[in-house]
Image: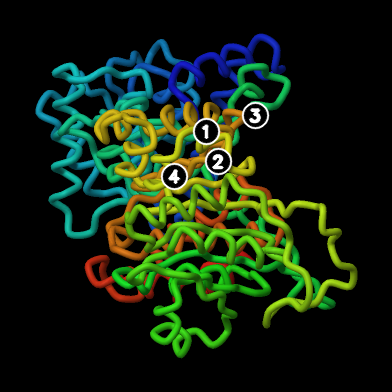
Amino acid sequence: MKFISVQEMRNIDKETDAVGGVSFAQLMENAGKGIAEVVLDLAFGPDDGSECLALVGPGNNGGDALVALTNLAAEGWKTAAYLFNRKADEDPLAARLKDAGGEILLAEDDPKFVQLTAAIESVSVVLDGLLGTGIKLPLREGAAKLLDASRKAIESLEWRPYVVAIDCPSGVDSDTGEAAPETIPADVTATMAAIKFGLLKLPAFELSGDLAVVDIGVTDKVPAWRAVTNFVADEDMVGEILPERPLSAHKGTFGTAVIAAGSVNYTGAALLAGKAAYRVGAGLVTLAVPSPLHGALAGQFPEATWLLLPHELGVVAEDAADVLAENLGRAAALLVGPGFGMEETTREFIRNLLTEKFAPKKGAARIGFVHAEVETPSDEMASLPPMVFDADGLKLLAQIEGWDALLPAPAVLTPHPGEMAVLTGLSKNEIQADRLGIARRYAQEWGHVVVLKGAFTVVAAPDGQTTTIPVATPALARAGTGDVLAGLIAGLRAQGVEAYESAVAGAWIHAQAGLYAAEMLGGTASVLAGDVLSAVPDVLADLD
């Protein structure tokens, strides 16, 4: 799904009319038909007493609403349009609805909203087509009063009608996500052609309900449509990314993920990341951890193989780089950083890993790896596999001059806003104020994939493309959930999925797993990182 600004949508509409082969009138017809289909998908039928009232404003959203009502009338629905600042006797769309059996109500004849309240009390669906994406706050008095009366009428009912907003709930700024206090919360928002930026910002997101994108006939013939580089992840996108799992597969088919993680103070990080890599499909997971952690972890993770790293007081020591590098011969992906701590010796481990030349290890491979049939010539230097950097690894990386050029490109970086502040020198407030723009800017500057975590996680590629994850939930506001995300991405990289696609799929699966875990437990407060991990198989099963 494409993700656009209000101005981009205006340009797309104009170009579609001018060169795309679809007129403004036909765009409205397509929109109205699509909105009607969204309403019909709510599982009402002619025998259910299905009735729909539309709040119809003066703009294009009002026109879309009238066309939708006409389509619903053709399906046997009882329909009514409540017109605000729109002349019924001069409106062919209103006339067409009336000919189809729809009722026309005028706000100018209903100053105390008596007819409006009575109509709302009798219908099963309210279509909100009062205001469009171009509004600016605060609302004008007339529109504000009408919305407020509608909202209060809906809230007063024991059995409330479904509210379907057209393009956006009236009163929402579709760029900033700000909302008027009179805005009616929607159960579904039917947004035209693409999701608007403001719908994935708070508070608009909470007011929009489920998002349904209506195909209005825009095609790649339209230059402004082709030029869109921002997207929103959905089930279809992620399903196409996940690799096939052929019946002839063996563990080597799905790659080896090596996870360098953990310290005595953060023992569980390695476990969560490693299990996540397995759960998303990696064939083999090797945990490279400070040696004192092995005894605490091994019994909890019998599926893993182990590489015990030199340590200083339980944190990774700088000379561990040689040990790790010598054992990366069959690694398809390397995750660095979860639970590392911030000790200087661990920073030097990262510096050594990225800057030194390592001769590949000869002889027998360690347990868990298939032996190489042909030894690598001794004069060939080993190269690092595709990398994922997370958590403390990112903050340590930021202390190494020129770190972005040292990483094998493209690496995947998974900062939360605090870690992004360390990497960029910006404040968290600056980052949060423009999450999409900041993620894109630094992905391009660094040449690596950036996963800016948080509500509506943004995944940005070095070529400027972005994908936003349409989830905001406190279920993921818990220590350890980031380790799960990093493991998912590393597990997908190990299977040969490209960096950007691994980040998109991993972030979407992670977000859905948070929602699943909250639903299973009956709320978000009790969700632990392990619960998110346990929900990953259910998310993947629903993608099949």
Q: Amino acid at mark 1?
A: Ala
- Classify residue 115 by image quadrant: top left
Eye-nearest disc, 3 or 4: 4
Pointer 1 local density, CA inside 10 Å: few below 14, some 14–19, many at least 20: many
Pointer 4 local density, CA inside 10 Å: few below 14, some 14–19, many at least 20: many
Eye-nearest disc, 3 or 1: 1
Distance from disc 3 to disc 4, alpha carbons, whole Å, reads 47 Å
Determine the residue located farthest toward the left in the rendered image. Answer: 112
Pointer 3 local density, CA inside 10 Å: few below 14, some 14–19, many at least 20: some
- Can you identify the residue that label 3 sits on? 217
Image location of residue 268, percent across then percent down: 37, 73
Image location of residue 208, percent across then percent down: 34, 42
Image quarter where the N terminus lies is top right
Distance from disc 4 to disc 1, alpha carbons, whole Å, reads 15 Å
| Residue at screen point 76% across, 72% down | 252
Q: Are marks 4 and 1 in contact (CB under 8 Å)?
A: no
Eye-nearest disc, 4 or 2: 4
Image quarter where the C terminus lies is bottom right
- Give the side of residue 335 with respect to residue 77, left or right: right
Q: Nearer the viewer, residue 463 or 316?
A: 316
Residue 449 tag number = 2
Residue 380 tag number = none
Q: Are marks 1 and 2 in contact (CB under 8 Å)?
A: yes
Mark 3 or mark 1, which has the lower sequence index? 3
- Give the SS element for disc 2: strand
- Give the SS element for disc 4: helix
- Can you identify the residue that label 4 sits on? 397
